[in-house]
Amino acid sequence: NAGVTQTPKFRVLKTGQSMTLLCAQDMNHEYMYWYRQDPGMGLRLIHYSVGEGTTAKGEVPDGYNVSRLKKQNFLLGLESAAPSQTSVYFCASSYPGGARAFFGQGTRLTVV
Amino acid sequence: QQQVKQSPQSLIVQKGGISIINCAYENTAFDYFPWYQQFPGKGPALLIAIRPDVSEKKEGRFTISFNKSAKQFSLHIMDSQPGDSATYFCAALFSGGYNKLIFGAGTRLAVHP
């Protein structure tokens, strides 16, 4: 029973490099989310998706892109990483209208 | 501008005491108010949730109190235990249309034995 799986768990990037974070869920959830967690800022919504092929901007979308080509996967891309994107990134999924979002274990990203 | 404001940022409580965390929101379109608990190195997990047509919800030692007119809600942890030490996030949800779950800044709770 995997739930929500994030890949990778840790990554160090140099400024200007690109990378993709992968989120996979096996609960057949329609909705998926990407959050970033920073000290004192809580969890801030980057982008989200309400179904396969759809994406929408959250609170802090700048510098990120996402894709939802398959229902079970939600990809978060950083085209040109900046030190301000150093953070812990969480993916989550849920049923429509539900307050219960299931979170992955997080990806700790450091941009130097 | 945070849509959900949470306080305090950190809280220290003695074992057996009551932990109280407060949240306030502005947007009356929110229609579901969950609380999440996060242990170090883990993702947040749903603890308890309430809808705005209910003033209080209790699950074991955890209680949500909701004041719709004041646009405030709070989490009370009765008989706090060291195992409750974690970060707690309040959140608010637009469940209609696009399902957006917005979180507060979090409260780091430490329960001392």
Image (cartoon, rainbow, N blue to C red):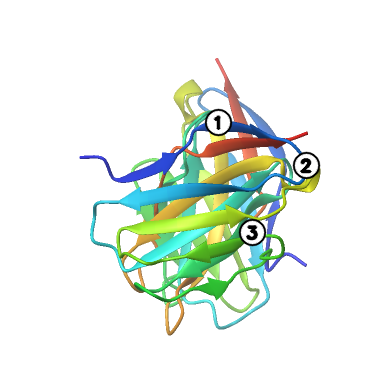
Residue at mark 3: B23
Label 2 to label 3, Cα distance in Å?
37 Å
Q: Are marks 3 and 1 in contact (CB under 8 Å)?
A: no
Tell which subunit mark 3 falls on: B
Name the secondary structure under disc 1.
Answer: strand
The tag on residue A15 is: 2
Question: Residue A18: x percent and y percent?
Answer: 64, 48
Instruction: Give the vertical position of A85 relative to B108 (above or below).
Output: below
Name the secondary structure under disc 3.
Answer: strand
At a point 43% along the width and 54% down the height, the residue shown is A92
Residue at mark 1: A10
- In this view, the residue farthest toward the top is B113
Q: In this view, does B26 lie to the left or right of B94?
A: right
Question: Residue B17: x percent and y percent?
Answer: 55, 30
Tell which subunit mark 1 falls on: A
The answer to whether one can see residue A35 in this image is yes
- In this view, the residue farthest toward the front is A17
User: Of residues A50 and B85, which is closer to you in this image?
Assistant: A50
Query: Could you classify mark 3 by the number of other residues whose Cα lies within 10 Å: few (under 14), some (14-19), or many (20 or more)?
Result: many
User: Of residues A27 and B96, which is closer to you in this image?
Assistant: A27
Q: Which of marks 2 and 3 is in front?
A: 2
Q: Which of marks 2 and 1 is in front?
A: 2
Question: Residue A17: x percent and y percent?
Answer: 70, 44
Label 2 to label 1, Cα distance in Å?
16 Å
Kindly identify the amino acid type of the residue bearing the numbered disc 2.
Thr
Tell which subunit mark 2 falls on: A
Instruction: Give the vertical position of B71 relative to A42 (above or below).
Output: below
At a point 45% along the width and 24% down the height, the residue shown is B83
Name the secondary structure under disc 2.
Answer: loop
Kindly identify the amino acid type of the residue bearing the numbered disc 3.
Cys
